Image (tube, rainbow, N blue to C red):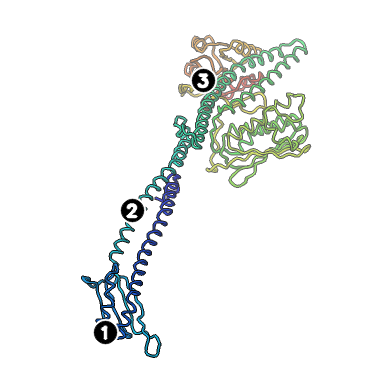
Amino acid sequence: MPLAAFSQSLVARTTASAALLASMLIAVPMVILIQADVRATRTELAIRAELATKIVLDDVANALWDLDPEEAQAALAPLRSVDAFAEAAVLGSQGERFTLYRRPGGGLLPEAASTTASSALTHMDRLGNRREIGTLLVRMDATPTNATIRHDVALLSGIGVGILLLVVLGVVWAARGVTAPIAAMTRTMTDLAAGDVTVAVPGRHRGDEIGRMATALRIFRQNAIDLRQAKERAEQAVASKAKFMAAASHDLRQPAQSLLMLAALLRTMAKTPDVADTAQKIEQVVMNLKQLLDELLEVSRLDAGGVTVTVGPHEISDLFQALDSQFGPVARGKGLTLTVSPLRASVATDRVLLLRLLGNLIDNAIRYTATGSIQVVGMAVGSHILVEVRDTGIGIPDDRLDAIWEEFHQLGNPERNRDNGIGLGLSIVKRLAGILGHPVKVRSVLGKGSVFSVTVPVAAAVGQPPEPPTAAWVDSAPAQTPSIALPPAPLPPAPPVTVPPVTPAIPEGVAVLVIDDDPFVLNGLSLFLANEGHRVHSVSVADHGVRDVQDGVFKPDVIVADYHLSATDTGLDFINRLWMLLGIRIPAVLISGRLDSAVAQQAREQGITVVPKPIMPERLSRLVKELPHAH
């Protein structure tokens, strides 16, 4: 634990290192000084003992030569004046003790409390040769010296400990003066990284490097506050944009729907080919407007995060079949061949969003392929399915492979021909791939074709039946894929209907009850259906429609209802009220320019056909004719 604390704390590590270094720098010289003092004191005592022996050496040697102990005692007497003298012994040549002289009043000293000096005793014999005749031992009392040493050691140790303590405290203070502010700023930066911009910045009033670091950190904190505020403003702007787009999605489709119906009516009632051709051109312009509106709104919703991903297991072969059914006729209408590989595997994805992604790739391949074929191929690669959309089109230059994902970027269409789209298809693909987590790549050979690949993970529970689509979108434009709707406010559940459906007898035409709160759309739908030979009753208020049916004014065979009728009424509620009133499930078509997946799912479960605005007139006419026979 202590080692872990040192490894994680700069303050602890720096303080401990500084204290240890200071201790070594003070303690080591102090120990050396004490040892030198002890050696010097003991050496001084030893030198004193050596000098003492030299004082009496000759006289003692003569006394020993004469074998006169009393003379030896007298020769040793001057040693009494030597400080710390304890005793002296004269030994013969064989080590036998000749005489012993002690300081008056002195006792026997232990070996550890004394210092001994020895000198050889020599004398000139009759032949003139100097002979060694014994040894003089002088023992000095080391007790005072040892006391002095202990005193000096204690004094020096005390001084050293005091100095060491002062140095350590100074070093610790200096180290913490550097490391503590850094540690405090580290905590501050950690809090800032965690999103807490209210934390105070330490060291703001210092004038050194720490103070300058604190100033920089304070500026960083203010930048974080500014960024958070900018983020909040951006989120508010995105939310406002999403609300605006939700409203625009509905409001802009309303006049488009009315234009389509009135143009179709004008075309059928035209008395000259020129008028019919003009009406048909109006329809085409409206459809181009619808395509532009759909793609612009979808890019906006994807950027605003207004798309919810619902991942579940889906059979890839069912997805391929849906794509073949939708785009096969379009490809054949252009003289191309669309083939889909017969792969069976369960993938984990959002069915509607993946269909939209692959649909955009297929639609893009059809637009840029003049002759040849488009292939949709699925291959198992480990735990993923690699879906490739291959075409024999114009291809993409190597230097444009990255640019094709940008908004409004088109190849080979400088005149902005609307038949080749508006340049948002691949940018939507890129956004959908990011939302789904399905990487999309492209490889291409200029003049020979392109291959777009999407990697989809295999579902964990292989073999489960695929979930039904979240919305039963029906559109009259084959090249358009299902739209992704913004979710409005949650709707109250529709009252359950338990009565069984019946098949009404329709002698001629179809009795259609049309309801829409927009008078232009209501008028256009009513006039078109009436011109198609149907019996039409139109209302703009839900209560009026229910009252007319209840009073027997009109008995509908089919209901065509807009979803957004008022602030409190919806087309779903209106259809369910009529079902409860009549006791039968009359076939119904729910149209809307903005509808969330939950409402679409609820409508699908009740057998209601859901179509986006604007719906092509021919498609609406076909639905009205076919629906009574489908129930």
Give the residue number, with chain letter if any, for mark 2.
158
Q: Is residue 405 above or below residue 103?
A: above
User: Residue 593: x percent and y percent?
Assistant: 59, 20
| Nearer to us in this view, 222 or 25 | 25
Q: Tag on residue 338?
A: none
Q: Earlier in the sequence, mark 2 or mark 3?
A: 2
Q: Tag on residue 572?
A: 3
Q: Secondary structure at mark 1?
A: loop
The label nearer to you, 1 versus 3, is 1
Q: Earlier in the sequence, mark 1 or mark 2?
A: 1
The label nearer to you, 1 versus 2, is 1
| Nearer to us in this view, 139 or 57 | 57
Q: Secondary structure at mark 3?
A: helix
Q: Residue at x 77, y 32 (%)?
A: 370
Q: How many C-alpha atoms fall within 10 Å of the one at disc 1: few (<14), some, or many (≥20)?
A: some
| Nearer to us in this view, 452 or 412 | 412
Q: Is residue 88 above or below residue 252?
A: below
